[in-house]
Every structure is written in structure tokens, then in C-alpha cells.
Image: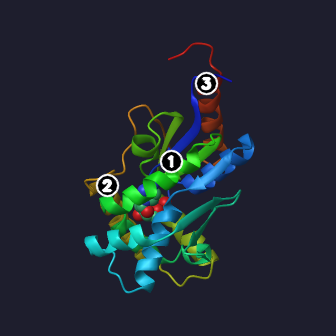
């Protein structure tokens, strides 16, 4: 393996582009660690909602984030999050938490708290991280950067299927509308907006199977880490 490259693979992209599925599967194949950074934003949003803090209230949200003891425990199927000693992982996927996370992630003070946690988790190396600003801000020196995207309808369909399978009472139109709000929030925030790093490999997953996307990723990994010439 080419030792010049940091052993971190970043996967960024909008909600529903397939990041979690692909990051988890790629990490499994490589026997690397899988880290879902959205879970950290979700944990702060959940705590805000529980404590009656409005995620849109910047000073209150930033103060809350700074006051929490947050631990992320990466596992093969996802990232468990402990907030002040309580494992909140099971409650992070609810639609209101998704919207709260999209709002709260705009605040620089919140992002700063999570930046050091995320970088600490990447220190060990051999990690596949997914999020919105992994390749642009958190791990700009990652060995391989991937950016996944897909048409909005295809992404909403995936999320709708996932939520209904979990027994959530949601409509397709509602999921699509929430997704548009989150896309807008992710792309328009002044701090760390969602965008592909200039050196990222971009993959449109709209019409690709999981295996197809995995092939593209594994090829990109081989080219990057095992190529003979430095680029
Ligand atoms: O990937 P996700 O849907 O679990 O992310 C939840 C929210 O957190 C999403 O609206 C954007 C935000 N987020 C972020 O701003 N930066 C990250 N690295 C990961 C997530």
C-alpha cells in the first residue's frame, strides 16, 4: 500500500445519496472502521429538542453543544452516540431530529465542538467517514475522497422505504419536502456547506445498484492506494 496517503476515505453527499449503505459496506470489505458523522449532529439536535432549546437559536444551540459530553463509538453497522452517559443512538433517526440536525449544523460553534471529536476518531487511520464536509474541511488530507449524489426523487424514495420499514408513519411527499429543506440548509450554510472537494471522485448513484457503486469505489481505492506513481 502506498504509505504516502493518509488511510482515511471520506464519503460526502446529500441525504439519501447512499452514503451510509456504501460507507458501511466499503468499510466491511476493507476491514476498516466505519464512522457516521451525521449521528453526532443528530445527537445534539435530539438533546436540544428534549431540553426545549430551539435548534434555530444560535447562541443557545452553541452553548448546549459546548456543555455536552459526547462520545462516538464506531461499530460495523453504525455509530453509537453517548451524550452525558446516555446512549441515544436509537432515537436519532426520527424525522424531527433530521430537520433539527439540518438547522443546528449551520452554527459554527456546534461544528467546532464536533470537529475535534471527528478528527480524534480519524487519528487511528483505516477509517471510512461519511458526512457533508469530510473531504473539504474535516479530513482535507484524506487518501481518497468520494462524493455521492442522486436525483432528488430517487433519494426520497430510498428514505421513504427505509422509514416505512422501521414503522414510521410518513408520506412520500412529506419525505421529499423534508429532504428539499435539508438540501437547502446543507448547501446554503456559510460554514462548511455541502460540496464536493475538488479532488473527490463523484458518483451518480441514481441508476446504480449497491454492487455497482461498490465496484466504482473499490476501483478508486485501488487506483489511489496501490498505484505505482504518486500524483
Ligand atoms: O447524514 P445525516 O442525514 O445523518 O446528517 C444529519 C444532518 O447533519 C444533515 O442535515 C447535515 C448535518 N451534517 C453536517 O452538517 N455535517 C456532517 N459532516 C454530517 C452531517
Q: Please determine whether, in this image, residue 179 is positioned above or below residue 49.
A: above
Q: Please determine whether, in this image, residue 220 is positioned above or below residue 16.
A: above
Task: Determine if residue 166 is in view.
Answer: yes
Choose the circle earlier in sequence order: 3 or 2. Answer: 2
Mark 1 or mark 2: which is in front?
1
Q: Is residue 137 left or right of residue 126?
A: left
Q: Is residue 138 left or right of residue 81?
A: left
Q: Residue at x 41, y 75 (%)?
A: 173
Q: Residue at x 62, y 40 (%)?
A: 125
Q: Circle 1 — which element?
A: helix
Cα separation, mark 3 vs mark 1, equals 25 Å
Choose the circle earlier in sequence order: 1 or 2. Answer: 1
Choose the circle earlier in sequence order: 3 or 1. Answer: 1
**Residue annotated with mark 3:** 223
Q: Please determine whether, in this image, residue 199 is positioned above or below residue 122.
A: above
- Indicate which disc residue 187 carries: 2
- Residue 119 screen position, x and y as percent: 50, 47
Amino acid at each position: 500500500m502506498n504509505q504516502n496517503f493518509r488511510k482515511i476515505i471520506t464519503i460526502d453527499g446529500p441525504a439519501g445519496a447512499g452514503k451510509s449503505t456504501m460507507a458501511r459496506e466499503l468499510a466491511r470489505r476493507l476491514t476498516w472502521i466505519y464512522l457516521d458523522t451525521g449521528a453526532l449532529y443528530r445527537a445534539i439536535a435530539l438533546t436540544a429538542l428534549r431540553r426545549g432549546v430551539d435548534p434555530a437559536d444560535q447562541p443557545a444551540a452553541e452553548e448546549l453543544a459546548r456543555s455536552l459530553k459526547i462520545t462516538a463509538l464506531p461499530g460495523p453497522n453504525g455509530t453509537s452516540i453517548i451524550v452525558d452517559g446516555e446512549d441515544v443512538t436509537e432515537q436519532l433517526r426520527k424525522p424531527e431530529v433530521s430537520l433539527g440536525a439540518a438547522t443546528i449544523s449551520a452554527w459554527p460553534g456546534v461544528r467546532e465542538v464536533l470537529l475535534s471529536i471527528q478528527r480524534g476518531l480519524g487519528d487511528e487511520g483505516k477509517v471510512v467517514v461519511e458526512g457533508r464536509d469530510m473531504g473539504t474541511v474535516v479530513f482535507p488530507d484524506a487518501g481518497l475522497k468520494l462524493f455521492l449524489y442522486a436525483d432528488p426523487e430517487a433519494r426520497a424514495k430510498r428514505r421513504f422505504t427505509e422509514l416505512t420499514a422501521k414503522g414510521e408513519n410518513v408520506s412520500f411527499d412529506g419525505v421529499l419536502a423534508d429532504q428539499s429543506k435539508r438540501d437547502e440548509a446543507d448547501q446554503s450554510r456559510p460554514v462548511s456547506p455541502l460540496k464536493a472537494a475538488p479532488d473527490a471522485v463523484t458518483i451518480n448513484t441514481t441508476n446504480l445498484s449497491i454492487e455497482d457503486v461498490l465496484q466504482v469505489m473499490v476501483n478508486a481505492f485501488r487506483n489511489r492506494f496501490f498505484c505505482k506513481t504518486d500524483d
